[in-house]
Image (cartoon, rainbow, N blue to C red):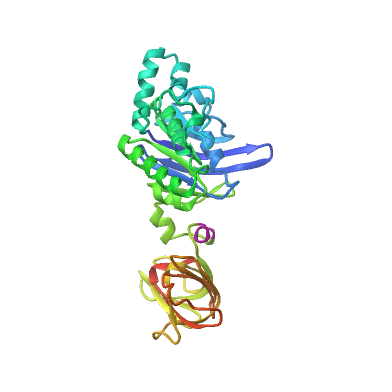
Amino acid sequence: MSVEFRNVVKRYGTTEAVSGIDFTVESGTLVTLLGPSGCGKTTTLRMIAGLELASEGRILIAGRDVTSLGATERDVSMVFQSYALFPHMTVVENVCYGLRRSGLAKDQAVVRAREGLATVGLTGYDERQPSELSGGQQQRVAVARALVLKPSVLLFDEPLSNLDARLRRQMREEIRELQQRLGLTVVYVTHDQQEAMAVSDRIIVMNAGRIEQQGTPRDLYERPATPFLARFMGESNPARGQVRRLSSASIRVRLGETEIEIGNTAAAEGEAKIAVRPEAITVEAAPGPAGALPGTISKASYLGTHMEYSIDTAAGTLFATCPRVERPLVSGDKVALVLAPRGVIVVES
C-alpha cells in the first residue's frame, strides 16, 4: 500500500519541525528517511503512524486520506528504537498483545503469534522472557509483533541503533530480505548512511525539516545535488574548481594543476564547488603520471586494512584512503594524486 505526503507541515507552537514536504512511497518498496538529528525524519514517521497529526497538508495511505485519523485507524504498525517489549510477558505473549487488543480470541492469537515468530526465525522461543534474549532476538520479536497485525505499512524508527556493528549488519540484511520476501511497504528511519544505502529502494534525505534530495542510493551518492548531500552521503572533500563545457553531455573540471573530464549535463561554466570522494583518489609517489595533482602528505593514519592521508594541494587539503599499507607514506612526503572521474562531482555552479 502506498504512502503519500502532500505539502505536509508540522508545527510545535511557533517551531516548524517539518516544512511543506512532498513524497510518495510506492507499494511494496522500502523507503528510508535519512538525515542528522533534529532534521524532522522521526516526526515525519510519527505522522505516518498517526502518533502526530499534521498541522497542514494531506497524508494518504493506499489512496485514502488519513490526515485527521488516529493511530488505531490507519492500519500501520511501528517497530520502535527501544523495541518496547513488556518485560513481564513471555515472547509469545508480547507478540499476541496487539492481536488480543484488537479482539482476537486467545487461541487464534497464539497461532498467529507463532506464525509470526517462525517468519522471523524464532520458532521455539515462545515461553522465554525478553531478558533472556539477545538484542537481535528482541528486535525480531518486535518485528514479529508488528507483522502479525498484517499492516498496510510497516514503520521502523532507528531499529538497529542499540546493536553492535556486526549485529547491525546482520539485522539490516534480515529486514531487507523479509521486506522483499513478503512484499511489504516499509518506511524506515535512520541517521546511518551505510544502513540506509544497504536496505533501501529509495532514500529521502531530510535537512532542517525539508527534503534535501530523494532518489536511489546510487543517485544520491554519485549525483548529490547540494553541498550538504555531498558531505552527508559518505566522505567527500570540498574544493573549488573551474568548469568548462566540452559538449552537451560532458565537462572538464580543473582542480589546481590537474583537469578531469566527467559526464554532466547541468553544470554551468565558470567557478564551481566540487566534491571529491576519498576513494576516487589514487596516491602515487611524486612526480607521478602526467596530469596528476601534486601534493604533500600532512597527516598519515594506519587503520589496519588501509591508510588514511590528509594531503595539501593547490585545490585545498584533500582526504584520501589507500589500500597499500605495506609501505606507508609519512608526513612531508611528496605525492601525485590521480583522480577518478566518477568520484569528482560538481555540487554547485
Q: Is residue 267 left or right of residue 9?
A: left
Residue 170 sits in quarter: top left
x then y, percent, for residue 9: 57, 39
Count the labels in the image: 0
Dominant SS type (magenta): helix
x then y, percent, for residue 114: 36, 23
Q: Is residue 275 above or below residue 207?
A: below
Q: Nearer the viewer, residue 138 or 231?
A: 138
Residue furthest front as drawn: 132
| Observer able to see residue 61 | no
Q: Is residue 117 left or right of residue 38?
A: left
Residue furthest left as drawn: 181
Q: Nearer the viewer, residue 301 or 23?
A: 301
Q: Is residue 273 left or right of residue 3?
A: right
x then y, percent, for residue 225: 47, 59
Q: Is residue 131 above or below residue 15?
A: above
Q: Residue at x 43, y 58 (%)?
A: 221
Q: Is residue 197 above or below residue 91?
A: below
| In the image, residue 219 lies in the stretch drawn in magenta | no
| Observer able to see residue 243 | yes
Quadrant location of the N terminus in the rendered image:
top left
x then y, percent, for residue 248: 36, 70
Q: Nearer the viewer, residue 324 or 45?
A: 324
Residue 87 sits in quarter: top right
Q: Residue at x 61, y 42 (%)?
A: 17
Residue range in magenta is 228-232
Q: Nearer the viewer, residue 88 or 298?
A: 88
